[in-house]
Amino acid sequence: MMLEANQILLLVTLVAPTVGAIAAATLPAEGDRAARILATVAAGVAFVASVLLLLSRSTQALVDPVPSYPYGIVVSPWVELDLPWVPGLDLRFHIGVDGISYPLVVLTTLLTLLCALYTCWRVPDSGGGPVRGRHLAALLLVIELGIVGVFLALDLVLFFVFFEVVLLPMYAVIAIWGGERRRHAARKFVLYTLLGSLLLLVGVFTVVASAGTADLVALSTAAGPAMPYGVQLAAFILLALAFAVKSPLWPLHTWLPDAHTEAPTVGSVILAGVLLKMGTYGLLRVAVGVAPAGAEAVAPVLGVLAVMAILVGGLVCLAQTDLKRLIAYSSVGHMGFVLLGIATLTSVGFQAALIGNIAHGIITGLLFFLAGAIKDRAHTGALGELGGLRETAPGLSGLLGYAAIASLGLPGLAGFWGEAFAVVAAFSRGGPFWIVLGVLAAVGAALAAAYFMRMLRQVTHGPPSPAVSSLTPARLAGAEVWSWAPLVVLALVLGLVPALVTELSAVPVEALIGVVGSP
Amino acid sequence: MIDHTALLPAYCAGGTALLAFLSDLVAPGRRALVLSVTLLGGLVTGVACWWGSRGGSRATFCLEPPDIPGVTIASERVCSFQWDGTATLVGILFATATVVVLGLSVSALRTGEVPAGEYCFLLACSMTGGVVLGASGDLITLIIAMETLTLPLYVLVGLRRRSVASAEAAVTFFVVSVVSTSVTLLGAALLYGATGTVHIRLLAGALESRAELRSVPLVSAAVVLVLVGLAFKVAAVPFHAWAPSTYDGAPLPIAAYLSTASKVGGVIALLIVAVGALEPWLDVAGPALAALAVLTMTVGNLAALRQRRMVRLLAWSSVAQAGYILAPLGAFALSSGRSLSATPVIVTAVLAYTVFYVVLELGAFGAVVALRGSADGGTLDDYRGAARRRPWVAGAFVLAMAGLAGLPPGLAGLFAKVTIVRALLDGGAGWLAVVVALNAVVGLAYYVRAAASLFGSPDPSSAARAVWPRVPVAASVVLAAVTIAALVIGLAPQLVLNAVTL
């Protein structure tokens, strides 16, 4: 069988991390640094491959400038690869990329590359165990394999398999390189999210048993609406629960603050940056796409929970005393906006959710890098013990201010679009119910401004605290600058040109709306 | 006419036992000789099993269908020994498990802790029972095969010299097992009394066509008794209490054999009886099987959470795994699970899960033997520092634990879970699938703990574990082979699914 160049690129995004992980993990201890560099190279190859995938879209666009989707075809990938794997379990190795998944794929490969780069420079303390930096780099690559696989999968069972790949490596990253309470946090993370993914398994086979196929392209078209209403409802509830644990949606979020706080810097970046997106992406692509009738029935509940997440996240953040924990809880709020966007079942809402996903990945990734850098230097993450950062480390403090402002949704930076349009979408749904939800979400956005301002006041302003005045080194290392710069630039670029994402996803979102039904 | 070709695998297995016995007799004390003779015999048996399946199924010890009033039998002859797809699969599984266990036994035999001649002879006897079991076509053959499989194990469990735990384990196992056999026999006798036959197919025919049996309470009792007796053998809750102490007292390789081959025997016997003989009565047997499965996995998982000793943890985990194996049979409780389309899917899922499980469990025990040598399983704390000193063995152990938990990188275990859930949902038993899912979450908690114990720093106060025994060549070869097998069936699970589709 001959593969086209595009299909090879698609495979490279999965093969490069796999090969890199195996190579890095099996190199002897003397080559620890070389192994980490090797892992970075593998992550780089995956990143380049994922960027080049965009070319395949433009060549398709030349042939067919306005891709016209026949009614009902929802998932129409630019590139796809469909190989048989396990016919006995309805499992095909069917992967592909379209406008909804592409930005997330690039975000994943980018963040992994940056984290691998950061790992070359600095490896968190693992307590003197037998595992070293090269193992951390290898685990990051395995996590990348799982996440990219989830975004690429066009087969439900394959989607589930990749969903599971992430669990144990992430557990190991938290449990080995994490903070003081790492064991507890790691176990909570792995048990909670395993519960989610097993519900996904049951949901997937509820769909497969009823529809007779696991192919997402086929399921999102004819077979989806053809499933009986009861099955759709059951499938949607199972799938939504599964993705709600991962996203996480209030009140299933309690694993997140512990995991994010205890994880090492690179672990937090990957967790917040892309791992949570598996949940929101899954909700949009799998749950809504496969069981639209179920989605319509459950959407109001989802909306209420999303708004609760926004408000609870905001209020908890106002009372937080730890920098990493504050950022972690802010993720609950931000993902609430994303879920609200999806719950409206409107094209504006879906678009808001997709760009909100990307923006949150970039900005929160940056925030966790910064929080890690501050914690490593000042040896504390307690807000009360920090203060006056701008006096001793103006560069770090300035970046923190930038990231915080981006995160609270200042127009012109990436965070704005997702949150503003999630609220707009709620209003456009009309009716008192959705308008109340929109108003409450807007209040939540104001809360975000309040807690980020409070955090900035405590951390950057005022006289330097003892911890901050003895902080070393004050300057940023080269590796830090290189691994943060892309995120800083992207937060601005995406804020100014949101069309980078929305233009890609416009057509597939319209197609999805065509099935879901709400105008 | 007796078809000796059909019996060839059984001859090979029995011959192996005889050769092991004779070689110990003519050359006493030559451990290597006995061991290699038995290993070779096990391999030959495996090949014979595979060879016997070529050219369709064969049967022997047949009788013309008797003329039982009111019973119509579709087929022409009923046979007590049928070498078909199931028999091939079971035979190969038993031969493989025996060979693997022998490989793991090298260090125990070398120290002279267990007498080599008796050990090999008894293990080969047990294998013979397993090979015949898969081919049995009537309840008598089934029960005798089951006993041939179990009887040598009473002795094997107690074979560790100077070990009180070992002797205790043997007595517990013996008593429980004998009771369970009598229960099964009682059930079989009652069934014979009610229907006048012990042949699986005749039983199915009689139970189907004679509606008046429904109103006889004794028949329901018989159905339940047969199932309960067999549930003892798979260590299903509430008949599981023997397993943890027996596993912990037995020599490590025998614990591995108990939790794999012996359990497979029980599962196959249950399948033959439940799906073969009792098929018309699955509405009675189904709910019992569902309850058995739910109880077994839940109790096994919850108890495993509290274990501090490695072998006890693995024992409780294998109780839980028996629950997953039985879970698809629980779908028979619903009429949708008893439909013509769902039944083969369910049987396939049970067999596939069994194969995945056996490979992973052998991997786990292989790693434990490689780390502990001829010592007993020890506590979880005894394994601290293993990852630093024996990274490859630790890797194999982590893979096996991940697989038993059903997570990548143990893809074999992941697909095993997928197979189960798929079969349950095909059978319309979504609730049971959710129970399996919840149980898998509980299971992960202790599998992670067991795997993480290898990565802890050794306790400085206990200097006893500062040295790790040298990994015997045989054990490392066996462990490598089992681990590679786990990886291969993880990447290509279709191989297993094809093998079990009968």
Image (spheres, coloured by chain):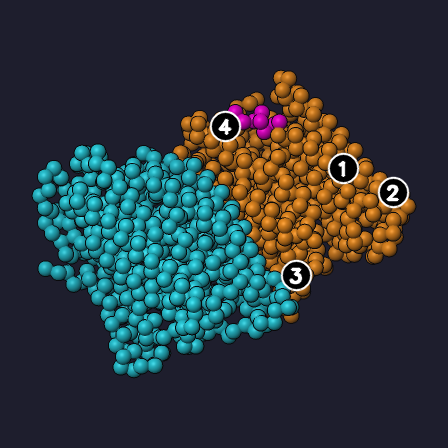
Chain colours: A orange, B cyan
Q: Which chain carries label 3?
A: A
The C terminus of chain A - image quarter: top right
Q: Name the residue under label 1.
A: A319
Classify 10 Å Cα crowding around label 2: few (below 14), some (14-19), many (20 and above): some
Dot 4 lies on which element? Answer: helix
Image coordinates for residue A43, horizontal then vertical, percent: 62, 54
Single out the residue that lies furthest toward the top. Answer: A431
Image coordinates for residue A162, horizontal then vertical, percent: 52, 47
> What is the magenta range?
A297-304
Residue nearer the viewer, A86 or A173? A173
User: Which residue occupies 44% across, 26% down?
Assistant: A229
Classify 10 Å Cα crowding around label 3: few (below 14), some (14-19), many (20 and above): many
Residue nearer the viewer, A22 or A246? A246
Q: Name the residue under label 4.
A: A294
Residue A438 makes an appearance in the image: yes
Pointer 4 with pointer 3, Cβ within 8 A: no
Q: Distance between the residues labelled 1 and 2?
A: 19 Å
Q: Name the residue under label 2.
A: A461
Dot 1 lies on which element? Answer: loop
Dot 3 lies on which element? Answer: helix
Q: Which chain carries label 2?
A: A
Q: Earlier in the sequence, mark 1 or mark 2?
A: 1
